[in-house]
Image (tube, rainbow, N blue to C red):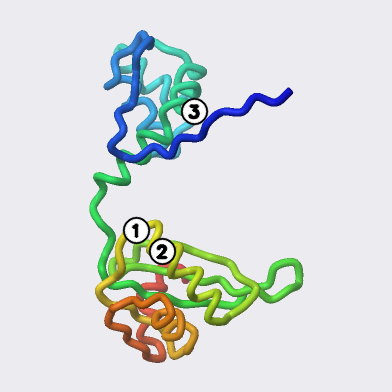
Amino acid sequence: MKRTTLQHDASATDAISYAGYRFPPEVIGYAVWLYYRFPLSLRMVEELLAARGIELTYETVRRWSVRFGLGIARRIRSTALARGDKWHLDEVVVSLSGRKHWLWRAVDQHGAVLDVLVQSRRDRQAARRLMRKLLRKHGRAPRVLITDKLGSYAAANREMGLNVEHRQHKGLNNSPFKVFA
């Protein structure tokens, strides 16, 4: 017999309960933050905390990461600086298992990658899927949308009813993508 649990969509404002844990919430939060923020192994986090006089095992850090990682990540994302309001969208062809696919990328004006999507088509539905994914992830529309001259972007923009300035120009959207080169 399978056990089913109710999935709760926790928001960033939900309080994380540290009741029943030996260490204070600050130590738990710091250990989980170290593990996810930097490319550190569990044993490295254990050593860093030991250098600060906190004795625990790497297994404890692993359990905390599993238990509290998602909640702490939500909290960090909600308090992080907002991404830029000028989005550059572009697509490039890639070959996966000998088949042609399109890699759709979105980058803000600072070069921060907003999202990446792989699709087998290069049409209005694919552009709409990327834009819906971006809007869902970032919670707001950009001020300016910069794309190449592919008509799918404009069609998806109209279909979704977005009221943003849309600049279409050959090569105008490629400057932030030099990060990928």
Q: At 59% across and 74% down in the image, what residue appears?
A: 102
Front residue of this view, candidates 114 and 46: 114
Q: Is residue 180 above or below residue 2?
A: below
Residue 107's quadrant in the figure? bottom left
Residue 131 horizontal/vertical position (percent): 43, 70
Q: Is residue 175 above or below residue 4?
A: below
Left or right for 51, reference 180:
left
Question: Residue 31, position in %: x, y?
Answer: 37, 25
Secondary element type, mark 2: helix
Report the residue at 23% width, 52% height from top: 81
Do labels 1 and 2 touch, CB within 8 Å? yes
Q: Position of residue 55 (x, y in %)?
A: 38, 10
Given the image, on which type of amino acid does mark 3 rest?
A: Val
Give left or right: position of 99 versus 173: right
Query: Which numbered disc, 3 or 1, marks the residue that appears first in the sequence?
Result: 3
Residue beneath disc 3? 66
Q: Amino acid at mark 2?
A: Leu
What is the distance, in whole Å, between disc 1 and disc 2 at their CAs?
Answer: 6 Å
Q: Which residue is mark 2?
A: 134
